[in-house]
Image: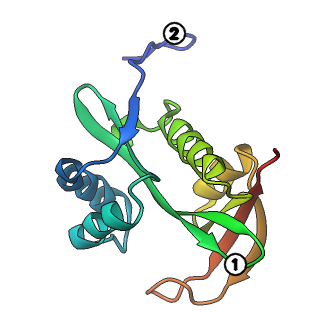
Amino acid sequence: MIRPGEIISYQPAHIRRATPLDVPSIVIVEKELFIDPWEQSVFLDALTYFSTTYFVAVCDAKVVGFVVGGLEDTGENIYGHLCNLGVTAPYQYRGIGRHLVNRIEHQFALELASGLQLEVRVSNTNARKFYQRLGYREVLQFEHYYSNGEDAVVMMKWFRF
């Protein structure tokens, strides 16, 4: 039992690029967290298309989180698009999600993206606050974006070079 004022020390997660062997663990995390989870085939396809911007967090010798995104070229700008992020519940609130986002932001900057965008469910206030703490701003809303008809908030963070 954790007592008030007690300091808890966690083993830091190791962030590395995802491999095909990680996908079954990623799918488990995905299904735990999301009401409309990606299929395993989508995660495998993402390894082909987004090999440089697909990372996992490993802690206690297991995959406990992931982030995947891709580059989008509008003709005027190149943006990173954070497509999916998840950290299994027992490992949340340890900074792992923040480290995953920082890692993908760094990679997008290396690939000359001027910023990063993402979509989040309007109802997911925890995620919206999380991204706001990381410097993301809500820029617009898409109606009926998700399969259940829920709207999405588009959030954006611009990189400074």
Left of 5 or right of it: where is 9?
left
Across and down, in percent, residue 97 comes to 51, 42
- Where does label 1 land, which residue? 74
Give the image location of residue 115, x and y in percent: 72, 58
Q: Which residue lies furthest to the top in this view?
A: 6
Q: In this view, does 52 lie to the left or right of 62?
A: right
What's the residue at 67%, 73% (across, down)? 153
Tell me the CA gap for discs 2 and 1: 49 Å
Q: In the structure shown, which secondary structural element does the residue marked by tag 2 occupy?
A: loop
- Give the amino acid type for the residue marked by disc 1 in the picture: Thr
Q: Which of 49 and 121 is in front in this view?
A: 49
Q: Where is residue 114 in the image (x, y as percent from the top left)?
A: 74, 58
What residue is drawn where x is 66% and y is 51%?
Answer: 131
- In this rendered view, identify the residue nearer to me: 3 or 103: 103
Visible residue check, residue 120: no
Query: Front-most of 26 and 130?
Result: 26
Decide if residue 49 is on the left or right side of residue 20.
right
Where is residue 81 drawn, in percent x and y? 58, 65
Which residue sits at x=36%, y=17%?
Answer: 1
Label 2 packing within 10 angstroms: few (<14), some (14-19), many (20+): few
Under circle 1, the secondary element is loop
Looking at the image, residue 54 sits to the left or right of residue 60; the answer is: right
Q: Which of marks 2 and 1 is nearer the N terminus?
A: 2
Residue placed at 41% from the left, 18% from the top?
10
Residue placed under numbered mark 2 in the picture: 6
57 above or below 24? above
Badge 1 crowding class, 10 Å Cα cut-off, few under 14, some 14 to 19, many 20 or more, is: few
Q: Is residue 57 visible?
A: yes
Identify the amino acid type marked 2.
Answer: Glu
- The color scheme shown is rainbow
